[in-house]
Image (tube, helix red, strand yellow):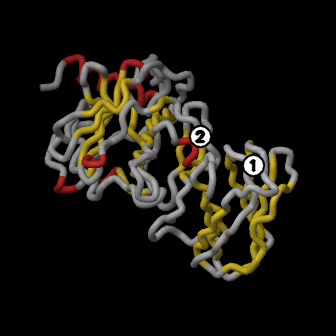
Amino acid sequence: MRTRSAVGLAVAVATTLASGRPAEATFHVMQIEQILAGVDGSTATQAIQLRMRLSGQNLVSQARLVVRDAAGANPVILQSIPTSVSAFAAGSRILLATANFSTATNPGVTPDFILESPIPDTYIAAGSLTFESDGGIVYWRVSWGGAGYTGSTVGSITNDADGEFGPAFAGPLPTGSGQALYFQFAAGAPSTSNSADYALTNGSAVFTNNAGASGSIVSLVGVPGGPPEALMLAGPLPNPVRGSMTYAVTLARESRVRVDVFDLSGRRRLALEERVLPAGRNSLTWDPASTGSLPGGVYFLRLRAGGEQRTARFVLLDRGAPLTHSAAE
């Protein structure tokens, strides 16, 4: 049963949206904009991005993120948000992610909050994620797994006119590349149904923190069915580098490429590749050696091909030197 306070809040939200007046500071009028449950088949890297539907939704210290299994049971608190945030314009984002998240984006993006717990692997095929008050009022819900999800799909009418967020998105949460599940509509848009509102990103997902810093997920697997890239440099992984690292060069056609390592001053330190590579995705490795070592620090890979160039930042933890590298279609 809807309480008077919930109905009153929904009426106030609708009136504010219609009038364009700024909202009082709160946290209720919020979307779950993106969910990343894993990268390249590993669920070690996860992220959830919230987006404010109205200005003034920065008091998120009163909220939490909770995930439930395919039956809508066994709740796991991913984050009980410890503090509020400073940016509060309509459309402002709040990024919650695992501790390694910044090494999986290019450029590196620092989450606003580190997730206390990741989404359990057993919940990825079907489950439900809620943005809710510390008292348990669900203000936004995303369910996935299609008919495989049999739990509740309801919540407050604050962000959904009838409080029914279902039916669930048809597929599982993506983990096989760099894609995320994302809300397809504008910051001010309400929920209609998860099946209609959510889709997979067309390419590697872009995440943004509350300070406005953005970065793309680095995927060595690539995005199935994604648009072809004229020239792309992916990686390196792992990052920071402590030994062998892998990166990838994607070419629209067979081309001569050059890959160099530059330091922060812009000085070229190593030449890694200069040869013809075939069209498509070429996986390359560089393994630090004991001779001609580089000191630990921040460096950049620079790829040049066909008159274009791409760069990728990495951190070298050990002293290293160029070793072998191989290419594969």
What residue sits right under mark 1 in the picture? 299
Residue 22 appears in the picture as rendered: no
Is 244 placed left or right of 303 in the picture? left
> Residue 161 versus residue 61: which sits nearer the camera?
61
Q: Which of marks 1 and 2 precedes in the sequence?
A: 2
Which quarter of the figure has residue 77?
A: top left
Q: Horizontal and vertical percent for residue 12?
A: 34, 22
Q: Extreme left residue here?
A: 1
In the image, which disc is placed on residue 52? none
Q: Horizontal and vertical percent for residue 120?
A: 30, 43
Is 323 placed left or right of 281 in the picture? right
Q: Which corner quadrant holds the C terminus?
A: bottom right
Q: Nearer the viewer, mark 2 or mark 1?
A: 1
Q: Horizontal and vertical percent for residue 186?
A: 46, 44
The structure residue drawn at horizontal position 60% and vertical position 43%, both measured from the top left corner, is: 214
Label 1 element class: strand
Residues marked 2 and 1 touching at CB (< 8 Å): no
The structure residue drawn at horizontal position 74% and vertical position 64%, both measured from the top left corner, is: 303
> Residue 94 versus residue 186: which sits nearer the camera?
94
Is 51 placed left or right of 324 in the picture? left
Q: Horizontal and vertical percent for residue 131?
A: 33, 32
The structure residue drawn at horizontal position 68% and vertical position 79%, both measured from the top left corner, is: 277
Residue 272 appears in the picture as rendered: yes
The structure residue drawn at horizontal position 26% and vertical position 19%, both measured from the top left corner, is: 135
Compared with residue 282, is residue 65 higher up or lower down, i.e. above or below? above
Q: CA distance from mark 2 to mark 1?
A: 17 Å
What residue sits right under mark 2 in the picture? 109
Tag 1: Cα neighbours inside 10 Å, few (<14), some, or many (≥20)?
many
Compared with residue 309, is residue 175 higher up or lower down, i.e. above or below? above
Q: Give amino acid for label 1.
A: Tyr
Is 190 placed left or right of 88 in the picture? left
> Residue 169 versus residue 118: which sits nearer the camera?
118
